[in-house]
Amino acid sequence: MTTNKSFRRFGVVRAFAPALMIAVAISAPVFAQDLELTEEDRIRLEAFKAFQDNIAEFLPTVNKIDPGILPITIPFREVREHVIVDVDFGNGVALPFMFDTGAPTYVTPEIASVHGGDVIVEAGAVAAGNKLTWSPMMRMSDITLGGKLPISDPTGEIGWSSEGAFYCITTNGLIGAPLMRNAVWQINYGTQEITVAAEVGQLDHIDGAIALPFTHKENSSSPTPHVELGVGDGILEFVVDTGGGIPLTINSADLASVGVALAEDAPRTGVLAGGAAGSFEMQLVAQTIPIRFGDTELMVPITVGDGMAPGANGNVGHTFLKNFVVTFDWSTRMIHLDPLFEGNSLPALPEPSAAAIGLEGSEVQVTSVPKGGPADAAGLRLGEVVTKVNGKDITDITPDAFCELTDGEIETITTASGQTYDASRIEGFFGDGQ
């Protein structure tokens, strides 16, 4: 799966708000889509297909890690439900990048102009809104991750927008699956460390862990893991996405296809998603259901909606993964999950805010409203322009000021209509179902 995360809306990541990111971030492989293509698109597509057909010769020449120096452990930090690592392009400057198994490596045009080389190919993907996008892939300068791990001849796609949905997380880009395929990567969410090894025998948290085989698309420059999990009376396919600040999500039609019905009184939230074709409203539902991970059954809080994971039935995101020590071994195509919790039930999702907000240019808008919450009951609607937060005027707010403001708790918001709404967290929103 290719993920184009260069979209325009970004918001406060709180409980249901992370699902907004999946709705607008995930994009599907261009080959699987029925699209109307321009002649220029067709020429690019043929060149991309030719590159993919011969990719086996290309892959050993890029994203190289010397196994003789492994294992190496580097720190990471969690920023708004995302894993962030520092990347040095050889100039001694540490730049924060998102760590994302669900995407290729992306950089901004500014970084590419300084640290990039020749364009290898233009990669095509279908972004939210069913729009075809193209990202030039180039060979980058050698990098060092976390001040310790050198990677030679990394590849990166140009397409990260410094003013997009992840501005408050990183303005630089993401480290994606292509940089991970040549080693074993273990993310310890308990200690906030990533250990990179030559093989799993160099690592703890393997014996006794849940072992899941994964697949990834053949002849792909971005080997995003896909796993099959038992849900209801069937098997569903999920993308494993460390870069998605979301719980385990499932497309509503796919959940229904395996015989799982949503409770009538299940918690619901309206969200405003923004894709390449513009903004659209959607509804997300929360429910806890049993899911089979191989021979292990766990009770998992999930989020259900439409278009949650184009190209798959669902997405396994950071808010789920952070409950484990997670190991990715591309050589054997296995994922190991060592629980950081007791028993067979994952911790409940955090209680949501009565309203979440996002920044569109210099305008703040309402992006999430849980149904039945105080803001919903008072008539707040998605897309309304917000002029005050906690009584403070925010008209013409800058992106940096927005990030600083939303790092704290939001108690009230005031819209352009002059009405003020309760935006505090809703205690007991999930009830006994979570």
Image (cartoon, helix red, strand yellow):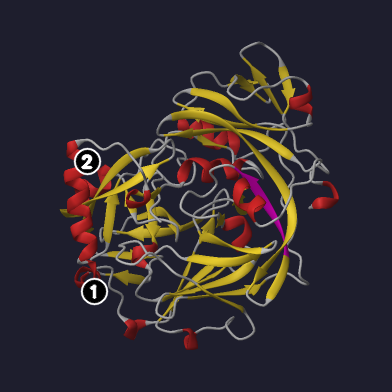
Between 330 and 131, the residue placed more toward the observer is: 131
Name the residue furthest bottom.
201
Between 166 and 432, the residue placed more toward the observer is: 432
Q: Nearer the viewer, mark 1 or mark 2?
A: 2
Residue 172 in sight from this viewpoint: yes
In the rendered view, tell whether residue 251 sits above or below residue 324: above
In the rendered view, tell whether residue 130 sits above or below residue 176: above
- Give the amino acid at mark 1: Pro
User: Which of the 4 image quarters holds residue 229?
Assistant: bottom right
Name the secondary structure under disc 1. Answer: helix
Q: Position of residue 11 (x, y in %)?
A: 55, 36
Q: Position of residue 248 (x, y in %)?
A: 62, 56
Residue 141 in sight from this viewpoint: no
In the rendered view, tell whether residue 425 sits above or below residue 1: above
Disc sitting over residue 41 in the figure: 2
Nearest to N terminus: mark 1 or mark 2: 2
The answer for how far apart the CA atoms under marks 1 and 2 are is 28 Å
**Is 348 on the left-hand or right-hand side of 221?**
right
Residue that label 1 marks? 60
Name the residue furthest left.
118
Write down the region rendered in magenta.
Answer: 299-305
